[in-house]
Amino acid sequence: MSVEELEARIAKLSVDIDLQKEVLRQLENQKSAAQRQLNAIRDPMTRLPLEISSQIFLQCLPSEGPMPEPRSAPILFLNVCNAWTEIALSTPALWAAIRLDGQDEAVEVLQRWLQRASHCSLSISLRRSLNDGVTAILWRCAKQLKHLEFYEPEHDAGSLPSLPCLQTLTIGSPLEDEFNELSLEHVMGLLRLTPNLVECGFHDISIHTPRDGPQKILLPSLRRVKFRDYGDNLLDHLSLPALEELALSLTNTSPDEFSLFLKRSLPPLRRLVLGCRSIDISFIPLNEWLRLLPSLTDLQLRTVGSGFAGNLFSALADVPSDFLPNLRSLEIQNHSWNPFPLSHPNVLRALSVRRTHLICFHLRTRHADPSPDVLYRLQQLATDGLEISVKIDGREYI
């Protein structure tokens, strides 16, 4: 067989192979289509009303907020079958929350995501993504925005829209090894945009406050505020008459400033978390603060000292007393190497006097060595219904 004949034969075989490949591709497509039809017939999800299948899908969303990842809901539902895709795209609530960890394609992803959310209230968590494109999107959906988190260096608050429906705002980095420095004007500018804010959190931020700061802001709806480690000097510039829960480390705010904040706001505070591992709480300012908070039911103290304990429990043991009359829960975390005076007579006396109102007493401390008599009396109080937990050097005694 000549060279020309062999080349012609090879060319013909190549054409035949291409034809067979096309036939195989068509058969594979037909098989996939038939398989999807069979899956749809067998899939119980497709036989449910949309209201029920949508609720099932909603239960699959991550608790920390969905991310645009192919292996997690709701993106995962788009990759199963046509029927699941239709259910997912017909359920706007699936797309009402999103968490973005980077700036790459943030604008495009947000636009597509929020289109699917339609008119739902929105929850958006952005980490280093508050650029001009994202700000423009927030402007367009401002009336739907209910929860907003962003963790980034300082950005021009004036470029953000007013957020009249925003209820929850979180500023700062959730990672322990990251720290943000913000100006007071920046933070105050953000708060001015949120007149109906209910909850606000500050994660590891340092707020630079000039001597002549801006006028104080009244936030009449704000009920819960949490400062993690830093930034609590912001309280010197706020008035919060509806505040019910407050957590602050006392790292940046002075005792006098905190007293003025409480006197200015007169909040109906129910839960107060004070101090951190590096703060030594003394009783004199603590006593003044607590007497301004008769509505308090839950008190948590975190400190490196225990010098306040004797006076605190002495005030709690007085009968009759207007000192914390509604207290239900007391938790003390003593991170000092000096032991907590658990055997102090006023500790047991206060717990006994308050046992009809106090629901729980938790103590975490170091190097304490409670006597058997003290442990026995604490156990008696626990038997009478008081929830008591005493952990010393990691060991649970009660």
Image (cartoon, rainbow, N blue to C red):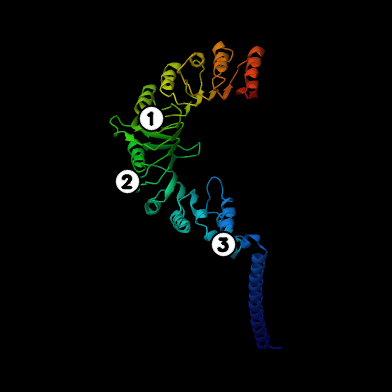
Kindly identify the amino acid type of the residue bearing the numbered disc 2: Gly
Q: Gap between marks 2 and 1, in whole Å?
A: 22 Å
Name the residue located 64 percent from the left edge and 79 percent from the top edge.
Answer: 18
Q: Quadrant of residue 322?
A: top left
Q: Callout 3: 10 Å neighbours few (<14), some, many (20+)?
A: some
Please report whichever mark, 2 or 3, sits nearer to the chain's N-terminal start.
3
Quarter of the figure with the C terminus:
top right
Q: In the rendered view, tell whether residue 299 sits above or below residue 171.
A: above
Taking depth in this image into account, of 53 and 131 the one nearest to the observer is: 53
Q: Quadrant of residue 27?
A: bottom right
Q: Gap between marks 2 and 3, in whole Å?
A: 39 Å
Kindly identify the amino acid type of the residue bearing the numbered disc 1: Asn
Name the residue located 41 percent from the left edge and 45 percent from the top edge.
Answer: 166
- Residue 276 image point, x, y percent: 49, 26
Q: Name the residue under label 3.
A: 85
- Residue 232 image point, x, y percent: 41, 30
Q: Name the residue under label 2.
A: 158
Q: Specify whether residue 72 is in view.
A: no
Q: Residue furthest right?
A: 1
Please report whichever mark, 1 or 3, sits nearer to the chain's N-terminal start.
3
41 relative position to 164: left or right: right
Please report whichever mark, 2 or 1, sits nearer to the chain's N-terminal start.
2
Task: Name the secondary structure under disc 1.
Answer: helix
Give the mark toward the camera: 2 or 3.
3
| Tag of residue 233 | 1
Q: Gap between marks 1 and 3, in whole Å?
A: 49 Å
307 relative position to 285: left or right: right
